[in-house]
Amino acid sequence: MSGSSEKELERSHLWRVKVIAAILFSDLEELEKVKKSLEAVFSKIDYQSEPYPFVFSDYYQEEMGGGLKRVLLSFKKLAKPEFLAASKLITREFENNNSIQGKRKVNIDIGYLDLFKVVLASFKGRGNKLYLSQGVWADIVLYFESGDYETFLWGFPDFKEKTYNQDLIQIRKLYKNQLKNHTGPA
């Protein structure tokens, strides 16, 4: 699809986006519990990546332990981008509900993908992030250019390494098909 056709498609659907989640975990049982909770809020999961070893940072190791993996999910129901701030608060509650003695067993980065970019919600503000509300910031982590996702200087190491690009391209294809076939509200 050409760039101008993508812009027309995006405009015609009032900025409906594909909800995604990047989840860090070490225990498959905990992941399954969180997936059920996420489906109850965001709709059925329509894509799940393989679990990738999370070897790019030891930032979470003290809290979550070793052997961390990251999985990407997308959800069937499209949303409007303004869902992001409230969704980050909901996913923090899921993280807290799955904590043991204040230590999280999962880390959920909720966000969305549209035809042009990948955005994740964050509680940490920085110069490259846009404030949404309720202490939540939007972090544009990737942009789509010439058939692939590209990162920014401030990008997370695993995204800079293009670890998830093939999965994100598959999710983007699902999203484009949904936009083509979409007839009702998000």
Image (spheres, helix red, strand yellow):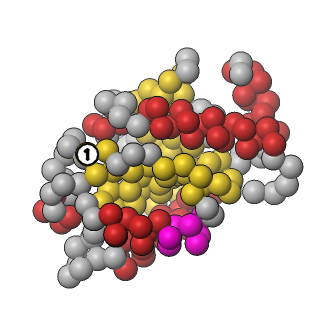
Q: Is the C terminus in the top left, top right, bottom left or bottom right quadrant?
A: bottom right
Residue at 39% over, 45% down: 50
How many numbered discs sit on the rendered protein?
Answer: 1
Inspect this view and state whether residue 84 appears: yes
Q: Position of residue 83 (x, y in %)?
A: 61, 61
What's the residue at 79%, 38% (across, down)?
Answer: 180
Q: Residue at x 39, y 50 (%)?
A: 71
Q: Looking at the rendering, which quadrant does residue 29 occupy? A: bottom left
Examine the residues drawn in magenta and state their main secondary structure: helix
The answer to whether residue 19 shows anywhere in this view is no
Q: Is residue 16 magenta?
A: no
Hey, what amino acid is under mark 1? Pro
Is residue 41 positioned above or below 3 on the image? Answer: below
Tell me if residue 51 comes above or below residue 166 in the rendering. Answer: below
Residue that carries the numbered disc 1 in the rendered image: 53
Q: Is residue 119 found left or right of 59 in the rendered image?
A: right
Single out the residue that lies furthest toward the right. 183
The local secondary structure at tag 1 comes to strand
The magenta region covers 36-42
Asked if residue 22 lies left or right of residue 6, the reply is: left
Residue 82, percent across and down? Answer: 63, 57
Tell me where residue 175 sits by quadrant: top right
2, above or below 172, in the image: above
- Report x, y in % for residue 4: 75, 21
Q: Which quadrant is the N terminus positioned in?
A: top right
109 relative to 16 in the view: left or right = left
Q: Position of residue 178 (x, y in %)?
A: 73, 44
